Amino acid sequence: MPHRQNQTVLPARRPGFEVMQAAPVKPVSRTTAWELSDENLKSLQSFIEVLQLKSYSASTIKTYRNEFMQLLQLLKNKPVDSLTVADLKRYMVFAMENQGISENTAHSRLNALKFYFEQVLERERFFWEIPRPKKPALLPKLLNEAEIRRLFNALTNKKHKAMLFTAYSAGLRVSEIVNLKIADVDSRRMQLFIARAKGKKDRYVNLSPVVLDILRNYMKDYTPKPTIYLFESDQTRDAYPTRTVQQIFTNAKNKAGIKKDVGVHSLRHSFATHLLDKGTDIRYIKDLLGHFNIKTTERYLHVSKQQLVNIVSPFDDLWKNEQIDW
């Protein structure tokens, strides 16, 4: 298709749109809110099909699709295939300065566009020239042990207790908690099998003896009894929704009077940091968390108090030697 370089990417305003559901990924259909041209609608369909053929996860497909749709919404009748590197640069500047998207969203949007132009259109390194914004170096948010106790004591429902106890005791992601199956609990080897976690990577994590007893009591007493998943929805009898687990955590946090801006993922961060505080080798923590790179795990070194407790502030020495008046 010939390139139409004389057209601009950026319109005067951003039209509204409706976000499609994540899974299952359905064929693309026209809606009045999208206002996509026939050509760009076909491009979107091809984009989704290639993502599916390459076995991308449902959550990644949802993210990439939504980010790609942001561009298609702005293009109106201009074919997306005709865009140049200069067009894409102007679009990303517009998205960051006028729409105010975050650094993380900018990275996701660039990844989606990169996938389309390189994987779908098979263009070579189409926009290596586009500068990527630097991601902020954020430290993991966590709860201290006293806050963990208050959070857990605020729970009353046995299933809710079992879920959050398991999440903290093994450092699991919320998606890993809801996808745990009864068959994944190996009481003989005292392990939990985490199947196809992030990056489609299987791993084993330690099963706490205390948590094993809690899970047995939960399975014995809870009605209706789970049949496949360890934590099943009472309504659908399928895996528990992740949003529900997040809300359970938030409700317990508020009831416990915890003011920190943290979510259920903070249990995973707290697990890793508390293990470091107790002297566990960071290489073992990397494997327990399922990290591909040790550098990801090393973030916890910055929040662990293990190495900090033995460092004496120079102010303390001055005070101890009575060199400061009060």
Image: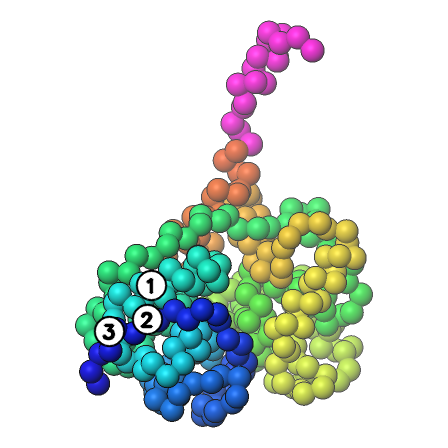
What whole-number distance in Å separates the C-alpha atoms at marks 3 and 1? 13 Å
178 vs 260: above or below: below
Quick one: 93 or 159, which is closer to the camera? Answer: 93
Regarding residue 118, the answer to whether it shows in the image is: no
Tell me if label 2 and label 1 are in contact, CB under 8 Å.
yes
Count of marks placed on residues: 3
Q: Is residue 307 left or right of 292 when viewed as pictured?
A: right
Q: Which residue is mark 3?
A: 5
Q: Which residue is mark 1?
A: 90
Residue type at mark 2 is: Thr
Regarding residue 174, the answer to whether it shows in the image is: yes
Q: How is the image coloured?
A: rainbow
**In which quadrant of the rendered view does residue 129 lie?**
bottom left
Quick one: 206 or 145, which is closer to the camera? Answer: 145
Indicate the position of residue 30 as horizontal and vertical percent values. 48, 91
* Label at residue 8: 2
**In which quadrant of the rendered view does residue 254 lie?**
bottom right
Please tell me which residue is depicted at 55% across the width and 44% down the height of the picture: 278
Indicate the position of residue 178 as horizontal and vertical percent values. 60, 74
Q: Is residue 156 left or right of 294 when viewed as pictured?
A: right
Q: Is residue 129 left or right of 257 when viewed as pictured?
A: left
Secondary-structure class at tag 2: loop
Quick one: 200 or 101, which is closer to the camera? Answer: 101
Indicate the position of residue 302 as horizontal and vertical percent values. 48, 42
What whole-number distance in Å separates the C-alpha atoms at marks 3 and 2? 8 Å
State the quadrant of the N terminus.
bottom left
- Region in magenta: 309-326
Indicate the position of residue 179 as horizontal and vertical percent values. 56, 76
Please tell me which residue is depicted at 53% across the width and 76% down the height of the picture: 16
Secondary-structure class at tag 1: helix
Residue type at mark 1 is: Arg
Number of other residues with Cα within 10 Å of mark 1, as a class: few under 14, some 14 to 19, many 20 or more:
some
